[in-house]
Amino acid sequence: MTLQFPLALLAFPLLLTAATLLSRRRKTPSQTYSGPFRFKSHSGSTGDNAAVLLQWLGIALLCVALARPQRGFERLPEAGEGVDIIITLDVSGSMTQSDYYPSRLAAAKKAALTFIEGRPNDRIGLVIYAEQPRTLCPPTFDHGTLERFIQGAELGSLSDGTAIGAGLAVAARGFNYSTTSRRVVVLISDGEDTSSQVDPITVARAVNTMHGDSLRVYTVAIGKPSAEEGLGVDRETLSRIAEINGGMLFDAESPEDLDLVYTAIDSLEASTLPAEGLFVYRDSYMFLLVTGMLLVALAGVMRYGFFKVVGD
């Protein structure tokens, strides 16, 4: 329960104080008349006291109604809200390299989990790729399930190889049912494309043709440059993929660099939804308003109907 105008509650003590001061300034003896019978003054009668009590109770309820109490509940964002993101993770054999502790894959998974925790209002999915790509989780608000898929992504689940183009194609296809205008692919690789049937640059152009400015691709190069052909990451290709699709290439030569990469992407693709969540509020003042008005009216009938003041 929340109050939209909590300061309105101050009206009750102010009215009560004003009424008390006025009653002290103009105390006059009164006499009540009840039918053809003659009674002594009833200014302190039980009925009159009850009327006063009902009147102030009604005023109190009206003041609470004026503060506009509301009940709220959290709702999940709708499919067309926020940002749809697909993390595309390389699980080829080279991700076992220990230049990242304990391995490149473990560091990449840890950074991805931290990134997900910071985006509770966005749908996020997971694609893994080696020789062939595989969608493990489509974009979803169920981040608990997504995290379990990330933790379970292991080497050896796919035949060894590196199909960057195929991984990008499957990730882009994961947005077929997306209704949001903002879509992001985070493509992580530590090698050169060796298994795609279609050149990664050609795939990147096709993705841009299909999605246009609604989809950005951020590529992440894991590992240090290698002088040996076939062992180092193909930064030139990753950079071109990102450039074609409105993103950029990030070099991550350490686990700390990976964390900074996700922080940068987080700032570049800031969600338009509040971090604290989405809440729907419904007014709850109507019952208080009606009850307060009825009590004030009843008090008036009791005081000026049954106990009519006729003078000294």
Image (cartoon, rainbow, N blue to C red):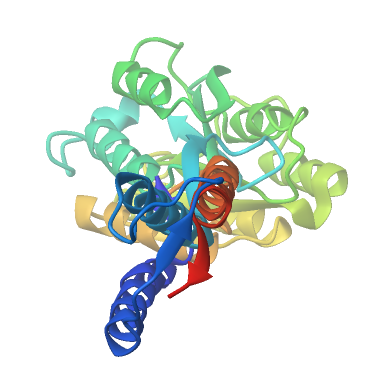
* 138 w.r.t. 70: above or below: above
Figure quadrant of residue 24: bottom left
Total marks placed: 0
Which quarter shows the C terminus?
A: bottom left
Rendered position, 36 above or below 240 = above
In depth, the one of 70 and 273 nearer the eye is: 70
Q: Position of residue 302 (x, y in %)?
A: 50, 48
Q: Which residue is depicted at the point 42% across and 29% down?
A: 143
Residue at left offset 35%, top offset 80% = 28
Q: Residue 219: x, y in percent?
A: 52, 51
- Identify the residue shown where x is 37% and y is 68%: 12
In the picture, measured across the screen, residue 58 lies left or right of residue 29, that is right
Left or right relative to 101: residue 310: right
Q: Residue furthest right?
A: 209
Looking at this view, name the residue that lies furthest to the bottom. Answer: 25
Residue 170, percent from left and from top: 66, 26
**Residue 296 coordinates in the image, percent (x, y):** 52, 53
Residue 71 or residue 46, whichever sits in front: 46
Task: For residue 304, say whether it is visible.
Answer: yes
Quadrant into which the N terminus falls: top left
Task: Report whether residue 224 is seen.
Answer: no
Q: Nearer the viewer, residue 95 or 227?
A: 95
